[in-house]
Amino acid sequence: MQPVFVLVHSPSVGPSTWYPVAERLEAAGHRVRVPSLLHIGAGAPPFWPRVVDAVRDDLRRVPAGSPLVLVAHSNAGLFVPVIRSALDRPVTASVFVDAALPARSGPTPVAPPELLDFLRPMAVDGRLPRWTDWWDEADVAPMFTDPRTRRTVVEEQPTLPLSYYEQHIPVPDGWDDHPCGYLLFGPPYDDLADEARRRGWRVAHLPGAHLHQIVDPAGTVRHLVELAAL
């Protein structure tokens, strides 16, 4: 049975960052789900169980027994172990796309200390600005090719609580008992791609900015299909 591609977006942005890839995958005959994590920042921590529930609830629309390929972008990569361990369906591969990697064992911090130092002064009443508002225009503009796509992505972004980035995500033993791969777009994720190689994962490189999947969905799809066929 052909696997279902489950495209998990970073909670810092929204599901529209995966829609162009989803459309290309479906046009090529693949089954696709894009769970929305837009509401996981509501309420008090911990937030990671809400990510798991959102993915699991979305997959209720998929026939039981269907194999899955988990595809995680950016900090959604940290949730792959808890998502994988919570699913009652076979996962044939996990692909990390310009993504943070979970620790080999033990809880993984969502943000390293230097990022938290950068974020804390931005918080107002414990809540942060939208992700694209953290950066200068010179950093944001290259991630988009047209104003309409930029507007869609920017307006969809949640304003997450600072406590989201202060959380630690569990890493269940044995979560990586299946093939994993890494798709690198570019800096600063080079070191993470190197770490993926050290873990024995297959790594591909599609040069671009951090949201390159919306710029080159065809190229992204090509690599995802190849990495999912490990």
Image (tube, helix red, strand yellow):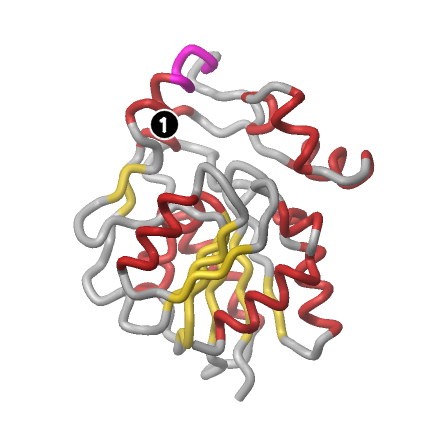
Left or right of 97 on screen, residue 15: right
Q: Amino acid at mark 1?
A: Ser
Residue in the image at 68% along x and 49% along y: 214
Q: Name the quadrant containing residue 121.
A: top left
Task: In the rendered view, tell whether residue 187 sits above or below residue 16.
Answer: above
Task: In the rendered view, tell whether residue 65 sits above or below residue 98.
Answer: below
Is 122 in the magenta? yes
Residue 176: image location, x then y, percent: 29, 66
Task: In the rendered view, tell whether residue 150 sits above or below residue 92.
Answer: above
Q: Name the quadrant containing residue 221.
A: bottom right
> Which quadrant does the C terminus fall into?
bottom left
Q: Which residue is mark 1?
A: 163
Is 219 in the magenta? no
Q: Which residues are magenta?
A: 118-123
Predominant SS of the magenta segment = helix
Is 184 or 26 nearer to us in this picture?
184
Residue 137: image location, x then y, percent: 66, 21
Q: Secondary structure at mark 1?
A: helix
Left or right of 120 on screen, residue 157: right
